[in-house]
Amino acid sequence: MSIRPIYLDCHATTPVDERVVAAMLPYFTEYFGNPASISHVYGWEAEAAVKQTREILAAAINATPEEIVFTSGATEANNLAIKGVAEVYFKKGQHIITIATEHSAVLDPCNYLKTLGFEITILPVKKDGLIDLTELEKAFRPETILVSVMAANNEIGVLQPLAEIGEMCHQSQIIFHTDAAQAIGKIPLDVQGMKIDLMSLTAHKVYGPKGIGALYVRRRNPRVQLAPQQHGGGHERGMRSGTLYTPQIVGFGKAVEIALAEQATETQRFTELRQRLWEQLSQLSGVHLNGHPQARLAGNLNISVEGVDGAALLLGLQPVMAVSSGSACSSTNTTPSHVLTALGHSPKLAYASVRFGIGRFNTEEEIDIVAKHAIATIQSLRNSAFVNLGSRE
Ligand SMILES: *Cc1c(COP(=O)(O)O)cnc(C)c1O
């Protein structure tokens, strides 16, 4: 049997939508020009395509096309935002605030800056994964230059209150960066209404290609300055040199265009599928939902399971479904997820967790197969744990 497991790991990546692939293809062979070539039609064609994606992304977040800087993905966008701000504004202050549940692409640049002498405050989150706004306010100092809080969490799907954070940062004249890798195309984003100064985006979580992303950089009220992290030909207004990857950029634009057009119906459909899955799984005792029940991505269900071993659980699920465990983004499977431990879970319970990432191509039938198999796996592990109780605990 070479049937592959059902893909339910859409926070890790998504398949590229066929419509996106179709839009990209001519830009490999026919319209292959360098968008920076200004003296002939090959360059103009490529530049026109890049401009179109800039416009789509800008419209998606209520920015202007000049405020979009293309990068290789959200990791690079986060690095450019955080290190780029630190290098320009260090004379004003050397304090940065972020939260415990951020992606490593935010936490690690912050930790790097710490080695250079910056002070980093990593705020804890509440049990539901949400930031405590009074704690944020208390952390503000005269020397705070940047607050980085993600839009949607990649493990538990929790949506942070961006507008409230933006307002607070704006009042105190602190630059506000948000990692919106999981949010673009899935929830409404508005850099004006939410007073966001920097926003990281990526294509591959929203049915676009891997290896392309963008950083929104505010140009007015205030104008945010960034030190480039990659020097060269001066592309992207000097903020990110390197020949633009036209086919990927075209795919990014198409993916976001489709996601916006389908956002309302997909949100509805994913919510129903998630409910369907949760209604079945929650019939078992000792199964906990991780993260706020409402303030979360429609396609995210993250559970912790009492009375089972995390590694055994994932192993049992693997033949039927492609999901991630409570050690999601780390390469060693011995450290439990920093996101789940930030919710106050014991390492053991954090480790016995499963992230279901429902996406565009999942069906009700698949959800039922997954639910049935997950329940059977948990029950059988619990039964054998009971038999071996003396030796295990
Ligand atoms: C996937 C992801 C990233 C990394 O994005 P890449 O484009 O793969 O570099 C960063 N932050 C969050 C929240 C993510 O989900």
Image (cartoon, grey):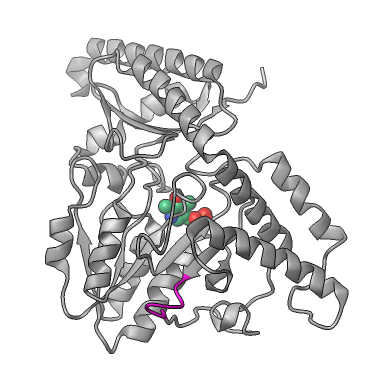
For this view, does 103 lie left or right of residue 287?
A: right
Q: Is residue 43 visible?
A: yes
Q: Quadrant of residue 285?
A: top left
Residue in the picture at 15% in, 75% down? 141
In the image, the segment drawn in magenta is 217-224
Residue 386 highlighted magenta (yes or no): no
Q: Position of residue 47 (x, y in %)?
A: 74, 71
Q: Is residue 217 depicted above or below 28 in this figure? A: below
Residue in the picture at 27% in, 71% down? 170
Q: Is residue 273 depicted above or below 51 in this figure? A: above
Image quadrant in which the N terminus is located: top right
For this view, does 19 lie left or right of residue 382?
A: right
Q: Is residue 245 visible?
A: no
Camera-nearest residue between 391 and 250: 250
Q: Position of residue 159 (x, y in %)?
A: 33, 46
Identify the main secondary structure in magenta: loop
Camera-nearest residue between 168 and 349: 168
For this view, does 253 lie left or right of residue 10?
A: right
